[in-house]
Image: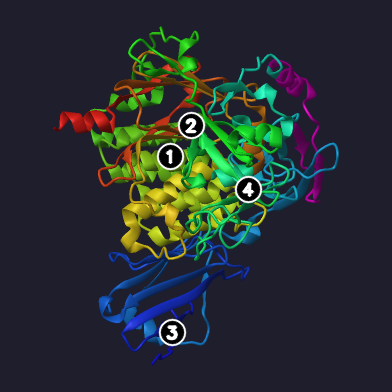
């Protein structure tokens, strides 16, 4: 029998106690002045492994056994920008009430802020999402919402600077506090330059394996061919690629033909119309004009689950529909899937060699390690001359008085210096960044990167929560939160966020650009922390105990349109370059800025060659060192396994216009490891 009891903690919330001595706290956390919900409030009993985080509506739930929490245990609510609320469990009953609302008080006087409102448009009167609006010569920054609107703390006499990729920067003097309507003009000269450079590409000849030899894709009609160029981040399974791409082709997935990015699989078997073998639940069924479709993979009949084919390995898909084209296949509609490795050349030992490695991409450079290429700033050299900790503190306090030292690099670099003396002092210095740039997501990302490099994941979580409030329309905000929750031990909150992102549960936010990393991270979470999670609604294909990557590299940056080049050099000294620039990836950068994501993942898994991989990087732009661009470089070894290893490095991208070696990775394939252990 369930028994209901209502309590209020310091500022009112409801608790339900069960006969089995289980207590559930359900509450909403609100701003005491605005009465608006406060998202991302950290709720916990410090010292106990019992914690929660409020959602976008300010709601949280905590469930625990009554005997586990003692009378003197402290209940805490901690939110960025609000006063901390603490209450002993013994006082819980004194706050008995029928309300379920907790009110927090802001640390600053909201009435003291002069909020200037406005809207940013294109020349065609289309609203611009994620345009940057900042107060010149300050860290005050705002980003526009989906309708182009913004609010920023500004005063009469300030100058606003409005920026967006592909448009001319615009400055507006604040003469009054009336709402602004800002129209941005396209930078046609820049975009035309990008277009012209893009026209120089040479079309590569592509082939499909028919099972009777290779055939050029040019021999097939345009409506029957899908190439790897058409496979985007919105595609996760082969069935996603096929659905809607070929006229007359019907793709059936379980109980419904429309599937979210991951779904509960069908609960019954599906029998093909021809009376052939039954398909396992969740296996896609392909029907073309009422006839089941057969599949050939690299020239051989394929009888497995189509969605188990890794889409990143696919070079092209050809659908044969006519009687003339299917006569060699028994007259049945046929899909030919050809992998990228199918027509690789072989060396003298019979091993496959990528055609990309046969081009002129031999690595012959000699470049410095990043650790040996950075000159220390003068203020760090001054600190290093200190004879003891006390003298170092005196030098630091003197340096802070210089207005030229009020930069993001200054506080990050001095925190790095003081870490060898006192980690608590180093964290206190990093808090100065938060005070200096509390409204600046770019600076706060730099702070979060440094905290993660220090291993201070709880502090980094608080910063990412603040960023999510500042950038609620950015897909990266929620991914960063999910990862921060995982690292801080909020596993269920992390899983819930990953599920919401992968099922498009956030209105007006597109996660397709980071879909693959989201899946990787959620599968890793499920594999390593499954016993601590409620995963009953997760599809079985995402619960594979075999999920792992030998090496996973994740690169993140604190400005969406940052321009840089990454270079990978394999053990045979062949290199592959990945450029993040408007010239080389115009569509991607435009999409990143619009949807607010700043990351890429690279996988080295089951590679054919052992040895050392090299990762090089260089910036393709110059910028002032006030609030510059940083990279966060994370490398995982044995990703998703119990013996996973992780290294996080923060990279001062703004200092490296010349190429430097960021990392050297010793790689040994699982096959080689197994052989050496025999």
Question: In this picture, is 7 found above or below 122?
Answer: below
User: Which circle, 3 or 4, is nearer the viewer?
Assistant: 4
Residue identifier under label 1: 449
Crowding at dot 1, Cα within 10 Å, few <14 / some 14-19 / many 20+, comes out as many
- Find numbered disc 3 in the image and state the secondary structure of the residue it sits on: loop
Comparing marks 4 and 2, which lies closer to the viewer? 4
Of pointers 4 and 2, the one earlier in the residue sequence? 4
Gap in angstroms between the C-alphas marked 3 and 4: 40 Å
Does any portion of residue 601 appear in the rendered image? Answer: yes
> Which residues make up the magenta segment?
170-197
**CB of mark 1 within 8 Å of CB of mark 3?**
no
**For this rendering, which residue is in front, 59 or 627?**
59
Q: Is 178 contained in the magenta span?
A: yes
| Residue that label 3 marks | 7
User: Which label belongs to residue 423?
Assistant: none
Residue under label 4: 510
Q: Quadrant of residue 35?
A: bottom right
Q: Indicate the position of residue 402 as horizontal and vertical percent values.
A: 48, 31
Residue 427 location in percent, x, y?
A: 36, 44
x, y (%) of residue 185?
A: 81, 31
- Measure how far apart labels 1 and 2 are at the Cα level: 8 Å
Quarter of the image with the N terminus in it:
bottom left
First-in-chain label (3 vs 4): 3
Question: Which comes sooner in the sequence, label 1 or label 3?
Answer: 3
Residue drawn at 59 percent across, 36 percent down = 329
At a point 48% along the width and 87% down the height, the residue shown is 97
On the picture, is 127 further left or further right than 405?
right
**Magenta highlight on residue 553:** no
Q: Residues at badges 1 and 2 in contact (C-beta under 8 Å)?
A: yes
Q: Mark 2 sits on what residue? A: 630
Vertical placement of residue 503 versus 636, above or below: below
């Amino acid at each position: 029998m369930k028994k209901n009891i209502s309590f209020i903690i310091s500022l009112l919330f409801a608790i339900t106690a069960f006969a089995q001595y289980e207590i559930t706290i359900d509450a909403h956390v609100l701003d005491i002045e605005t009465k608006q919900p406060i998202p991302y409030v950290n709720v916990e009993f410090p010292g106990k492994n019992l914690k929660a985080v409020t959602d976008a509506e300010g709601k949280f739930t905590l469930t625990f056994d009554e005997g586990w929490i003692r009378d003197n245990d402290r209940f805490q609510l901690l939110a960025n920008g609000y006063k901390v609320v603490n209450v002993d469990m013994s006082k819980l009953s004194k706050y008995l009430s029928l309300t379920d609302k907790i009110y927090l008080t802001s640390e600053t006087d909201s009435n003291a802020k002069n909020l200037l409102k406005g809207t940013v448009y294109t020349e065609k009167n289309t609203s611009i999402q994620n345009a940057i609006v900042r107060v010149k010569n300050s860290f005050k920054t705002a980003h526009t919402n989906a309708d182009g609107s913004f609010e920023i703390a500004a005063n009469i006499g300030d100058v606003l600077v409005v920026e967006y990729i592909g448009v001319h920067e615009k400055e507006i003097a604040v003469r009054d506090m009336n709402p602004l309507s800002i129209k941005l003009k396209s930078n046609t000269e820049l975009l035309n330059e990008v277009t012209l450079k893009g026209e120089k590409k040479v079309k590569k000849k592509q082939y499909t394996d028919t099972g009777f030899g290779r055939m050029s894709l040019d021999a097939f009609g345009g409506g029957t061919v899908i190439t790897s160029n058409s496979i985007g981040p919105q595609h996760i399974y082969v069935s996603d690629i096929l659905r809607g791409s070929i006229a007359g082709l019907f793709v059936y997935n379980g109980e419904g033909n429309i599937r979210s990015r991951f779904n509960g699989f069908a609960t019954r078997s599906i029998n093909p119309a021809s009376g052939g073998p039954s398909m396992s639940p969740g296996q896609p069924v392909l029907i073309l004009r009422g006839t089941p479709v057969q599949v050939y993979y690299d020239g051989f009949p394929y009888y497995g689950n189509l969605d188990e084919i890794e889409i990143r390995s696919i070079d092209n898909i050809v659908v044969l529909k006519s009687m003339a084209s299917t006569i060699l296949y028994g007259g049945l509609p046929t899909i030919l899937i050809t992998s990228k490795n199918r027509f690789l050349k072989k060396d003298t030992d019979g091993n496959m060699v990528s055609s990309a490695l046969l081009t002129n991409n031999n690595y012959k450079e000699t470049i410095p390690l990043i650790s040996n290429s950075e000159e220390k700033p003068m203020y760090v050299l001054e600190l290093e001359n200190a004879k003891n900790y006390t003298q170092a503190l005196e030098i630091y306090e003197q340096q802070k008085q210089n207005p030229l030292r009020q930069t993001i690099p200054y506080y990050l670099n001095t925190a790095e210096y003081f870490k060898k003396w006192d980690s608590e002092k180093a964290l206190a210095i990093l808090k100065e960044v938060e005070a200096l740039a509390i409204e600046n997501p770019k600076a706060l990302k730099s702070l979060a990167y440094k905290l993660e490099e220090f291993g201070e994941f709880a502090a980094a979580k608080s910063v990412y929560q603040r960023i999510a409030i500042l950038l609620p329309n950015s897909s990266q905000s929620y991914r960063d939160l999910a990862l921060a929750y995982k690292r801080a031990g909020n596993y269920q909150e992390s899983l819930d966020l990953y599920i919401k992102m992968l099922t498009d549960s956030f209105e007006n936010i597109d996660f397709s650009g980071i879909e693959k990393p989201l899946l990787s991270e959620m599968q890793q979470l499920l594999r390593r922390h499954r016993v601590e999670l409620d995963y009953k609604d997760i599809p079985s294909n995402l619960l594979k105990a075999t999920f792992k990557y030998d090496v996973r590299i994740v690169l993140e940056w604190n400005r969406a349109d940052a321009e840089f080049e990454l270079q990978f050099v394999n053990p045979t000294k062949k290199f592959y370059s990945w450029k993040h620039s408007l010239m080389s990836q115009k569509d991607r950068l435009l999409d990143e800025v619009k949807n607010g994501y700043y990351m890429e993942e690279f996988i080295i898994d089951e590679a054919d060659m052992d040895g050392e991989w090299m990762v090089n990087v260089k910036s393709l732009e110059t910028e002032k060192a006030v609030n510059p661009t940083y990279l966060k470089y994370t490398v995982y070894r044995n990703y998703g396994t119990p013996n996973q290893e992780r290294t996080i490095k923060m990279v001062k991208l703004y200092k490296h216009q010349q190429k430097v070696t960021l990392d050297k990775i010793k790689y040994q394939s699982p096959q080689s490891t197994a052989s050496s252990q025999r």
